[in-house]
Image: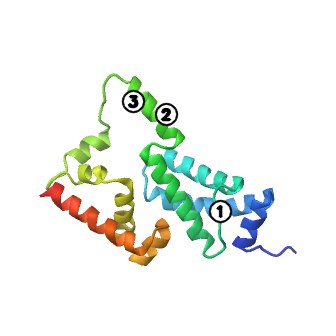
Amino acid sequence: MRETRSDGELLRAAADGDRRAFEELYRRYAPWLTARLRGRCADPGVVDDVVQETFLAVWRGTARYREDGDVAGWLWRVGARRLVDALRGDGARGRLRQTLARLRHRHEASAEERVLAGVEHGDLAGALTRLSPELRAVLQATVIDGLTTREAAVLLGIPPGTVKTRALRARKRLREELA
């Protein structure tokens, strides 16, 4: 009977080119990462792309695990950063969307955009979308996900002081826009 390898052992083996270790790591964490990312992004296509890009980075070794923490937390940080890149338009899907948008003669608002534009008591949806992805990510982690500053810092891969500063900036900008 074969013993189950730890996450750290799987990562090390995958980094050395062990396909079975990589597949096991993917089976363990892809569903979880997908569920977490869907909490941040409603577009399942973007989420699926980000999950694939995250595990591709693990396989290729472009995402480096320093063996000083939880593998799930590390994968989440890699995935969350890839999601921010995708939402900024830096991902492949974003570049395609930008190209198609330039070719389109007019912009038609989606049903979601039309509903959100009609939110009473100010344009909260618009104010949130006008925040930078970094500020939005901090608000998501601290306000919506209910994480502490320290937990948000680990999740986002930034110092706790940066989390506090970004949260203050985000709240100030929202107050200014909604006043």
Q: State the residue at coordinates (66%, 51%).
A: 56
Residue 109 drawn above or below residue 139: above
Count residues near mark 1 (Cα–Cα under 10 Å), then give few for <14, some for 14-19, many for 20+: few
Count residues near mark 3 (Cα–Cα under 10 Å), then give few for <14, some for 14-19, many for 20+: few
Q: Left or right? Give the position of 141 relative to 36.
A: left
Q: Quadrant of the N terminus?
A: bottom right
| Callout 2 secondary element | helix
Q: Quadrant of residue 20?
A: bottom right
Q: Earlier in the sequence, mark 1 or mark 2?
A: 1
Identify the amino acid type marked 2.
Leu
Residue 169, percent from left and from top = 27, 64
Identify the amino acid type marked 1.
Arg
Q: State the residue at coordinates (31%, 44%).
A: 112
Residue 50 or residue 172, whichever sits in front: 172
**Mark 3 highlights which residue?**
101
Identify the amino acid type marked 3.
Ala
Q: What separation in Å lies between label 2 and label 3 (alpha carbons)? A: 9 Å
Q: Are marks 2 and 3 in contact (CB under 8 Å)?
A: no
Q: Left or right? Give the position of 55 relative to 9.
A: left
**Mark 2 highlights which residue?**
96
Q: Earlier in the sequence, mark 2 or mark 3?
A: 2
Of the numbered discs in the image, which one, if any, rests on residue 64? 1
Residue 120 drawn above or below residue 114: below
Residue 65 or residue 86, whichever sits in front: 65
